[in-house]
Image (cartoon, rainbow, N blue to C red):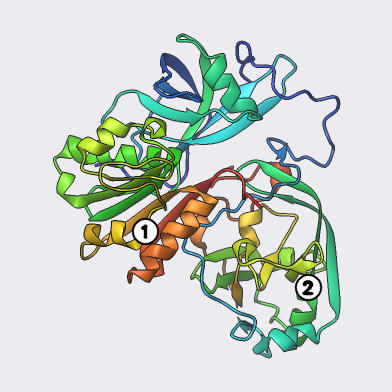
Amino acid sequence: MPGPTRGFLGRTRPARDPRLPPGQYDVGADWPVLTAEPTPRISPETWSITVAGNVENPTTWDWDGVHALPRSEYRGDIHCVTTWSKFDTHFAGVSLDALWDVARPTPEGQYVMATSKSGYTTNLPLEDLTGGKAWLVWEFGGEPLSIEHGGPVRLLVPHLYFWKSAKWVTKLDVLLRDQQGFWERNGYHDRGDPWRQQRYQGD
Amino acid sequence: MPARLVAPGPWTTATVSGVRRPLPRSVQLRLDVEGRVDHLPGQHYVVRLTAEDGYTAQRSYSVASPPSDPLLELFVERLDDGEVSTYLADVVEPGDTVEVRGPIGGWFAWDGEEPALLVGGGTGVVPLVAMVRHARATGREDLLRVAVSARTLAELPYADELRAAGAVVVTTREAHGIRPAGRLTAADLLPLWEPGQTAFVCGSAGFARTASDLLVGLGFAPSSVRVEQFGPSGS
């Protein structure tokens, strides 16, 4: 552990918020937009989500199809690897469990590659996408999710760094082995647990 | 040619060897990085500061220097509520040490061998400056076309170097040459198009969205447009 930086005081910090993982700061009301590619043109009418790969029942849902599934909400915090965290967010959509219940991953299928309309990809262990920990969401704060923030529908995996919550998601492929997605090939961690500061490969 | 580094090394110590403030509200730092490895132009570093009580804060900053420069040059915009940028802009002196980690990022990185169109807004020009300098150092200026935007010429980082490199300069708050004040348009970018280019777009979220939409509108495949954003969403 290095010594202190001369003259660095940092923010006033009466008490560190226990909701803040190490190395993160509270971004407050703001919600930074970070994407690596042009924003795609995508509308609810043309959007769909396909769950395929190592599943017993590959299935595609369109906008009406996902809305017919039981509504599920997330209230809590999100954490970006660029070190901002946002508290008390409110997203609504559907739990991924409702999709898994229909598509039924095979016992060998342990990993997932999420793919976006833009071509963006990110890899996750299936275990991180089951058990009420992950959602497809189309509402933020009671309003339709804007396209800048991944609308009409994005993945939400709030217990991992937010690059795992793929914007404009259209496909979930269940894989036998872990394969690297876009940021993971470009130096970022395969799992991305903010509480363990798994920011880059090797962390 | 530097290696394609996708995973950064461990935290290391950087000694500040130079501090300049060529523009208001920003600082240009020259760092002597212990165990520095060559970066690709466009990559960034993370700077970490530690307070007496062990509290740490870390932020990412683009590199302005080319890999051939023995020192690492960062250009940091001072944000009023930025606990790292205010420290770097107001407090840091030559001889100080900070922790750094990098280089980071395998996507917004130019290999120095393929044609590229660079489009930057405000301090978003910084990683593009590293590309321009690398091209100059390797004698491959022919590969790059550059367009930059700032509120005024006086607020454009590295304005002289960018103009010397032939950059199209757009100023949104003042007339510039025969060009009236205004935002970047497709007409600014069209003459810079060359076959086989990858586009590198860097700026605020709003600038990056506008510029990348213009490029896609001109016929760039979305997969050939690489975007890096910083700052608040503005919404």
Three-letter code, disc 2: Gly
Residue B78 to residue A147: above or below: above
Q: Where is residue A145 in the image (x, y as percent from the top left)?
A: 70, 67
10 Å crowding of disc 1: few (<14), some (14-19), many (20+): few
Q: Quadrant of residue B124?
A: top left
* Residue B17 visible in the snapshot: yes
Describe the element under mark 1 as helix, strand or loop. Answer: loop
Q: Please indicate whether residue B156 sits to the left or right of residue B141 in the image.
A: right
Chain bearing tag 2 is A
Three-letter code, disc 1: Thr
* Cα–Cα gap, marks 1 and 2: 38 Å
The disc at residue B202 is none
Q: Please indicate whether residue B23 sits to the left or right of residue B25 in the image.
A: left
The disc at residue A93 is 2
Q: Which residue is rendered at x = 27% and y = 54% of the image?
A: B116
Q: Which residue is rendered at x = 57% and y = 51% of the image?
A: A189
Residues marked 1 and 2 touching at CB (< 8 Å): no
The disc at residue B185 is 1
Q: Please indicate whether residue B205 sits to the left or right of residue B32 in the image.
A: right
Q: Please indicate whether residue A23 sits to the left or right of residue A71 in the image.
A: left
Q: Position of residue B82 (x, y in %)?
A: 63, 30
